[in-house]
Image (cartoon, rainbow, N blue to C red):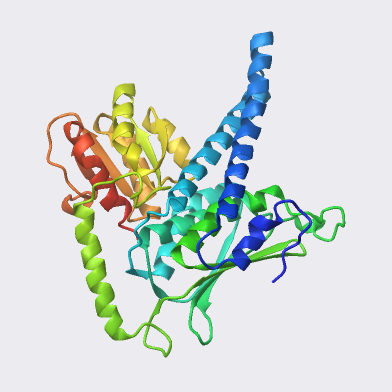
Amino acid sequence: MSIPPSTSTASACSAANDVAGEPSPVQWTEIVQQLGAEIAGPLSSALERIHDLVSTGQIDRQSLRALRESVSQAREAGMLGQQLARLASGRLKLSRERMHLTQILRGVLAQRSRETQARGIQVRQILKPVEIMADGSLLFALLNALMDWALASTHSSIDLRLDLTPWPAKARLVCRFAHRSLDLIDDPRFKELPLALNSLAWRLVEQTALTMGVLPLREDEAGITVLTLEFPQIIGDEPGLIAASSEREAGRELAQSSERVAEFQPSNNSKPLAGSHVLIISAQRELRGQIQAAMQHMGLIIDLAGSMAEAAQFCQEGLPHGIVFESALRGDDFEQLFADVMREVPDFCFVEVLDEPHLTQLSTATADGLARISRLHLNDALSSVLMFELSKGL
């Protein structure tokens, strides 16, 4: 496979083709430099517009939109940096669980369907049923990082193919898209790779894969990018796959993992669902802050909404992975949002926060499928509830 060496970021993509083990200190140095650039660039643009606002006392809609986009870009870079720092810590304890890769990938695609539709991007799938042994939270993070990178980079549809390689048997996930507009592919003026292709979003895909022991092989040629992720530990009866006896061991490990969920005590280096996206809905600023504080150590991406109407508008552009909402906001608007989301993603995470004392309940123990928690128990129990609810689709 060939990677064009013409850009200064060529090492960012070639590293994945050259390294199958732990990332080197040189790679992490490059990532830190890139992180600084991707935060400083948008913030410099935002600061320039703020200076204009201070000097003129006014700002037009176009400049306001650009200011918001700049701040959003810097925020996204910072959150990517947090996830990369978690991978760089070297203190992650990876579990080995039996995971149905096909089902998890389909779940991620269903979760992202609103976003792909809003962008007018078609995701075409040819997915064979494949089960693997992998760390569930990192697998979930890898597939979402893959979609983030592909959606930000594509100028075409995104083609996903999941199958098995010949001997030695491995699961092979192939993602293919055009990184140039189709009418510019043959234009000699556009030989260099777009910046989005080697952004921090790509670094997160690459480093998550390497941390899992998954080999990322990337090819950029003639305006087309093809990324192949090879998962080495496959479950099945065919020669070369993990034998049926190992499945029993996998089942025991999965049961032990489920028991650990109930005892989950998060720390800075143990963030099982770091990078998952949660929307907090509350009209009370104090409650929004309390919910956010209870989740701050989990490494989650958090957004806030002050009403159900604001939340519905937010979800139109793309669903988060979970919603934590104030019980006082339940009404017709919530019921409509709940019905729409659950129709698309049946395992979606909803957590209702009640003002009055209430037993903490998981969604599996309620008739309507909502998890519930009292405001009094947020600091003690919300992280454990989210740990379970966000893991339901894994």
Q: Which residue is located at x 19 percent, y 29 percent?
A: 355
Q: Indicate left or right for 284 with 57 as reference.
A: left
In the foreground, 207 or 361: 207
For this orientation, the residue located farthest to the right is 188
**Can residue 370 be seen by looking at this rendering?**
no
Q: In what quadrant of the picture does the C terminus appear?
A: bottom left
| 104 relative to 86, above or below | below
Residue in view at x 71 percent, y 56 percent:
10
Taking the spot 67% from the left edge, 25% from the top edge, the residue there is 62
Q: Is residue 286 visible?
A: yes
Give x and y (percent) for residue 346: 34, 56
Residue 388 lies left or right of residue 229; in this view the side is left
Q: Position of residue 253 (x, y in %)?
A: 25, 69
Left or right: where 169 falls relative to 154 = left
Residue 72 shown left or right of residue 222 in the figure: left
- Residue nearest the observer in this picture, 126 or 82: 82
Q: What quarter of the picture does the N terminus occupy?
A: bottom right
| Residue at 66% across, 16% down | 51
Residue 382 image offset from top left, x and y in percent: 24, 41
Residue 223 location, quadrant: bottom right
Residue 210 x/y as whole percent = 50, 63
